[in-house]
Image (cartoon, rainbow, N blue to C red):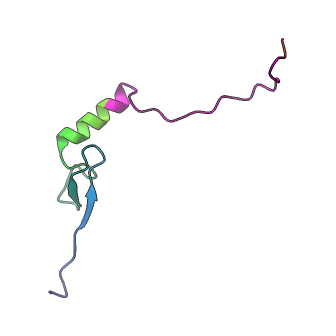
Amino acid sequence: MNAGAKKTRMVNCPRCGTATPWSEANACRPFCSERCKLIDLGQWATEGYRIPQEEADTGKSEGEDS
């Protein structure tokens, strides 16, 4: 093995699961392709992905009326 050789780290594409190199040569990282990158962006844009939000505490107990 060449002492100067650098091992490329492989990661799974978050969209399709394909192993893809994590390097500057992969402009779409962490995605495997422009297609997977755009599909993921579309999911965020159409609110297909949501960050869970806890209900705000209003300071009232259950059963209390205003």
Location of residue 7 (image quadrant): bottom left
Quadrant where the N terminus is found in the figure: bottom left
In the rendered image, residue 20, in percent from the top left (x then y), is placed at 21, 57
In the rendered image, residue 45, in percent from the top left (x then y), is placed at 35, 28
Q: Which residue is drawn at 30% across and 30% down?
A: 42
Q: Which residue is drawn at 41% across and 33% down?
A: 49
Residue 17 versus residue 40 in the image, above or below: below
- Dominant SS of magenta comes to loop
In the rendered image, residue 43, in percent from the top left (x then y), is placed at 33, 31
Specify the farthest residue to the front. Answer: 63
Q: Which residue is drawn at 18% across and 46% down?
A: 33
Quadrant where the C terminus is found in the figure: top right
In the rendered image, residue 54, in percent from the top left (x then y), is placed at 63, 33
In the image, residue 5 lies in the stretch drawn in magenta: no
Q: Count the labels in the image.
A: 0
Specify the farthest residue to the left. Answer: 2
Residue 19 versus residue 36 in the image, above or below: below
Residue 17 versus residue 3 in the image, above or below: above
Write down the region rendered in magenta. Answer: 43-63
Q: Which of 4 and 54 is in front in this view?
A: 54
Q: Which of 53 and 16 is in front in this view?
A: 16
Q: Residue at x 82, y 17 (%)?
A: 63
